[in-house]
Image: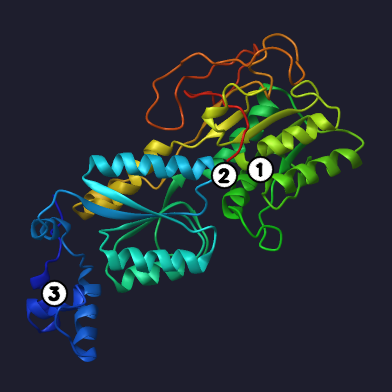
Amino acid sequence: MSVKRPTLADVAQRAGTSTAVVSYVMNNGPRPVSDRLRAKVVAAADELNYRPDRNARALRRPRRWRQIGLLVPDMTMPLFGAFAGRVEIEARARDHLTMIGNTGFDPEREREFAAAFIDIGIDGLLVVGAVDAPGTAAICDRARIPVVWVHNSRGMIDSPIVGADHRAAGRLAARHLTAAHSCDNLVFVGGFTEDTVHHGDRETVAQRYAGFAAAAGADHQVVRTDLTAEGAYAAVRGFLRETRRPPGGMVIGTGGQSAAAMRAVTDAGLRIPGDIRIVGFDADTAGVFGQITLTSVRQPIGAITRAALDRLLGDNAESEAAAPAHLEVALDTGESCGCGTGSGPAAVGHGAPVVPERTGPADGDQAAAGSGSRCGEPCSGVAEGVAAAPTST
């Protein structure tokens, strides 16, 4: 049974005014409305959970295309670039063009983009990795513009976040090392506190670490970084220089640190995976021909994007409620943990990179070909995808 969405007439009746006045309030014109009457209209709209009818708006526009806004924290990171590319494709299939704002992890810039996009006339806003969710939510709420939060967010909001289960991702990474490769003395590389990380996705790293710690047990260590490549290299080199016993396995908390952390391992004279087996997150599929492929936990970017757009552009409450908030992750096995190196451990630079076999269909996510285990062990969590080289995130 479909849920009847409130109309302009419903708001007008509740506020005790005309539909014309409600239209003036919702569209900020063309005629002025007194503050007292405006407050009554806004209160009535809130009580009814009214949203402007996008289909009615489209009828008033002599054109096919409508538009949404998309905010991402850093377009130079392949993960966020992948989100932006997928949103453009999926939104276009729904007759929406995408306006993109790169916030640079800056709360003021995030709010500025949100307000500017609303002024231009977007029908909704997707925010990937929000850094001021309460402030941005308030701007959208005042303008009666729907907003959907994707991947993660900074600040408390009373709305679901559509994204991967990051705690499950951390558990999957640790369990692969302990169960498939019998690694002990695991180490987690990343930062997740405000005093450590000023430019980066510390909320996601904190959730991944929580899952990692639950699976790794008490016998693990943390190499704290500021989530930059430079910071990761320096922290891992310093850790390996000081430790008396190198860890058996390493989980690198973000894709952007992977190449730097792995370089720090080899610069310390240690072999991957011969001395340290490594698992990361969100490997860049473009790096499949790198020197060594990274075993990586992958987010289903295509599924996340579709679920977010279902919530943003859903025509009724039922379609919004049916869109999932948290989606499962999968493990793409590569050479860095030992799964892609055949028999016996190899040092970095020995042999050609392995292009894994297909084990299932790609779904528009970060996958082009399936992965498969080559270590002769039961590598849990293996799913379709390319085991990609660690270049950047």
Q: Which residue is mark 3?
A: 23
Which is nearer the eye, 357 or 247?
Answer: 357
- Residue 167 - label: 2
Tag 2–tag 1 contact (CB < 8 Å): yes
Amino acid type of the residue tagged 3 in the rendering: Ser
Q: Which residue is mark 1?
A: 214
Residue 363 in the image, given as x and y percentages of width and height: 37, 28
Lateral position of residue 128 relative to residue 190, left or right: left
Q: Mark 2 to mark 1: distance in Å? A: 9 Å
Q: Up-down: is 131 above or below 330?
A: below
Counting the numbered discs, the total is: 3
The residue sitting at 40% across, 24% down in the picture is 362
Earlier residue among tags 2 and 1: 2
Tag 1–tag 3 contact (CB < 8 Å): no
Lateral position of residue 153 relative to residue 305, left or right: right
Earlier residue among tags 1 and 3: 3
The residue sitting at 29% across, 58% down in the picture is 124
Which is nearer the eye, 187 or 194?
Answer: 194
Mark 1 falls on what kind of element? helix
Which is nearer the eye, 134 or 122?
Answer: 122
